[in-house]
Amino acid sequence: MHRLDLLVIGIYLFCILALGFFRNKNYKNESDEYILAGRKLSLPSFVITLVATWYGGILGIGENTYLYGIQTWFIFALPYYIFAIIFAFFIAGKINHLNSISIPDQFHSRYGKTAGIISALYILILSSPAPYILSIGILLQFTMGIPFSFSLILAITISLCYIWIGGLRAIVRTDFVQVSFMFLGFILLLFYSIKFASSNPTSLNTLPESHLDFTGGASVQYILAWFFIALWTFVDPGFYQRCAAAKSANTARNGILISIVFWFIFDMLTLSTGMYAKALLTTGDPLFSYPRLGELVLPPIAYGIFITGLLATIMSTIDSLGFVSAITFGRDILWRIRSQGEKSDKEWDIASTNFIREGLIVTAFIALSLAFIIPSIVKLWYILGSILVPGLILPFLISFSKKKISILPMMIFPIIIGFVWIIIGELHGNYPLGLEPFYPGILTSIIIYGINRTNG
């Protein structure tokens, strides 16, 4: 990288750390302030932090677009718009009116301590920043030659250190800078890709026909499995936290709808540049399609801004999901299983913040472990979504009603079925009955729900 490119990255990191560690003199050491920014999140802040959190696996998006074309938009974008719209109109306002801080908190209030802790264990894994730490480790290794292991540790240290002090407010402040670099970086990449292609027409390769097919050559069942995995949106702890932190139900609903517009714009940028990467690049690892395209078409400074945009895209997700995971482990598990004894409510409120800070350390360890065990970004998404979402989605939606239902079987058996399905698939090279693992998991949940209603 050119020294000017490195200078851009250095300025970005300085701004992130300065904003992250800034602390308002009126800051109150209370859990609502630390976790939910005092439940006063404005519309611009809501939109910025939700948009920033959504794109951490940007290298995986580039890899999938390079390999399968517009399929990427149909599995990683369109279904999420649909479920986000449903979430905005039917769920966001309800979350905002509750006193709950997190999904496990809501499970605890509705179903009891055991269900609350089990849901916390699921959320702890589901919200792990492991795929994004893996992304940034690979990116730093590719662009700067930093050893992979050191890259992972550096990424998670920088992304989580300022949360220790500032909580959600620190994340929101840094997200303004990160979103700016995200969009500017990909706008520059698209502009220079078009310019390069127009001045070097012989460099263009013909796109495979499958790149213009929404299936990308995959089976319709596979595409539908990804579509239903997008139900993840309903149990996304980042969505929940932002809706709980919004200053009103209207802010939560409108914020999600506005965010969808920004997601669409960014998706068009990433899809277009991914197709240019396929057309302009001939060989190399598809995972590095975006940085390789930038290396080909961008001049100094512009390349630095783009690489910084990739870093910002990933880091904005690491800090948000790292914080959610820390809340889940520290407050929803450790804090819940401790007896309150003779401490006052105020003392236990402060204690929950300390537990969350301890959870940051555990979160870092779990995320690093997962990144080493499953070194594939898209595979991490697929496996975690296929196993865990079926055990959470129906119990979560039912929690907004007053129906009396035995919830633990619905939370446990779908997870066991999905896990066994994946193990069998790995051992035999294909899944039983040719079904992707999400389907037997969600079907198990639906069957148990039907039995519950019949018996009820």
Image (spheres, rainbow, N blue to C red):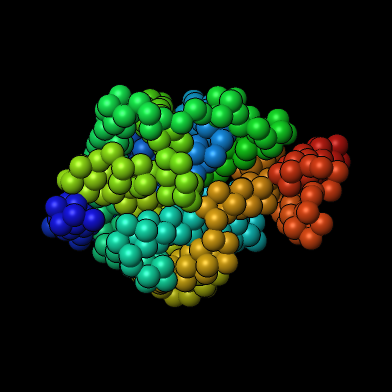
In which quadrant will I find the N terminus?
bottom left
- The single residue placed furthest to the front in the displayed view is 202
Judge left or right: residue 369 versus residue 31: right
- Relative height, residue 47 to residue 161 (above, below): above
Residue placed most toward the observer, 282 or 230: 282
Q: Residue at x 67, y 51 (%)?
A: 387
Q: Position of residue 401 (x, y in %)?
A: 63, 36
Residue placed most toward the observer, 59 or 75: 59
Q: Residue at x 48, y 75 (%)?
A: 341
Query: What count of labels does the image hold?
Result: 0
- Relative height, residue 439 to residue 77 (above, below): below
Q: Say whether residue 126 is visible.
A: no
Q: Say whether residue 165 is visible.
A: yes
- The single residue placed furthest to the bottom in the displayed view is 342
Q: Residue at x 37, y 70 (%)?
A: 147
Q: Position of residue 183 (x, y in %)?
A: 28, 36
Judge left or right: residue 279 versus residue 414: left
Q: Residue at x 64, y 56 (%)?
A: 115
Residue placed most toward the observer, 83 or 308: 308
Q: Position of residue 297 (x, y in %)?
A: 28, 39
Q: Position of residue 231 (x, y in %)?
A: 60, 37
In which quadrant will I find the C terminus?
top right
Q: Quadrant of residue 132?
A: bottom left
Judge left or right: residue 240 versus residue 219: left
